[in-house]
Amino acid sequence: MRACPPVHPPRTRDCTIRRVVVEDVVFRGNVFALLSSFGADVDVRRSRFVDNEHAISTFYASATISDSTFLRNRFAASSNRLITIARSRFVDNEQTFTGSETRLRLTDSVVTGSRIVYDNYDGVGAFFEGNTFARNGIVIGSDFSLDADEILHNRFVDNDLAVSATTPKHLVGNTFVGNRVAVASDPDQITPGVPFVAMEGNTFRRNGDAVYLTHPASLKDTVAIGNTGYGIYAPLATDLGGNVAYRNGTEPQCTGVVCETRS
């Protein structure tokens, strides 16, 4: 950042900081490591955030994060605006992403060991592509959102609950392995509206429950094999074909769609 330079002759100038760039910096042991507000957007590159209460927090400002590491923070990133993250690692943070009215875009990153990865109230839909989520509690959950979360080509491994389908979701080409619950709605949900879940080309192996959806959904090319609980339970689903389920622990193997089954 640079102070507003003097001008001759003197006249009124707008010296508002519009963008803060942070490169190759380590933030350790702070209450707020990086805090920005009211239009001062943050661009973080190749930096480390370790043992902070709040690593990055923005209020009416956006954050762009790339090639960075977040380790053992209480809150890794929070905002009420856009957060864009690429090629970054999040390890053992209590809560990775949180906020209200937040739009998160997370790509090509790894998130492990969080109690909650993503939780957002009154959001406008998040975008997840090409990430790995492993050994977390709840990975993707929201209390209320009008727009669908886009969940594309991610890996969910050994999480407690991978995707909580209490808000609209669009899942394409994801792999779920070893999760206690992979994709599930809450039959006792009290949040406004009925979320719609659209699923295409997702694979579920060795989870507890694979797909458990009590709200309207559409399923296409869903593969559920060798899960110890439900394979596909979606009684209100629209069947778009190509679904496969066998060797799951709960019969019938499919509810709500027609599945190819094998012994």
Image (spheres, rainbow, N blue to C red):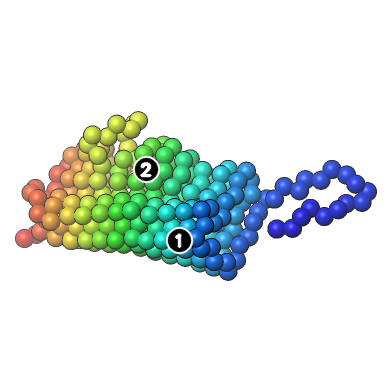
Considering every residue shown, the one lying at the far left of the view is: 263
Query: Image quadrant for the N terminus?
Result: bottom right
Give the image location of residue 10, x and y in percent. Answer: 90, 46
**Residue type indicated by callout 1:** Asp
Residue shown at 59% from the left, 49% from the top: 36
For the residue pair 148 and 51, the one nearer the viewer reads as 51
Please indicate, yes or no, whether residue 159 appears anywhere in the rendered image: yes
Residue at image point 59% right, 58% down? 43
State left or right for residue 25 relative to residue 248.
right
Q: Is residue 67 above or below residue 216?
A: below
Reading the image, the residue beneath label 1 is: 51
> x and y percent of residue 202 in the render?
28, 56
**Residue found at the far right of this picture:** 9
Indicate the secondary structure of the residue bearing disc 2.
strand
Give the residue displayed 19% in from the left and 57% down from the top.
207
The residue pinned by badge 2 equals 142
Q: x, y percentage for residue 30?
A: 52, 57
Disc on the earlier residue, 2 or 1: 1
Measured as percent of width and height from the top left, residue 130 is found at 40, 62
Estimate how packed mark 1 is, as few (under 14), some (14 to 19) or many (20 or more) residues with alpha carbons within 10 Å.
Answer: many
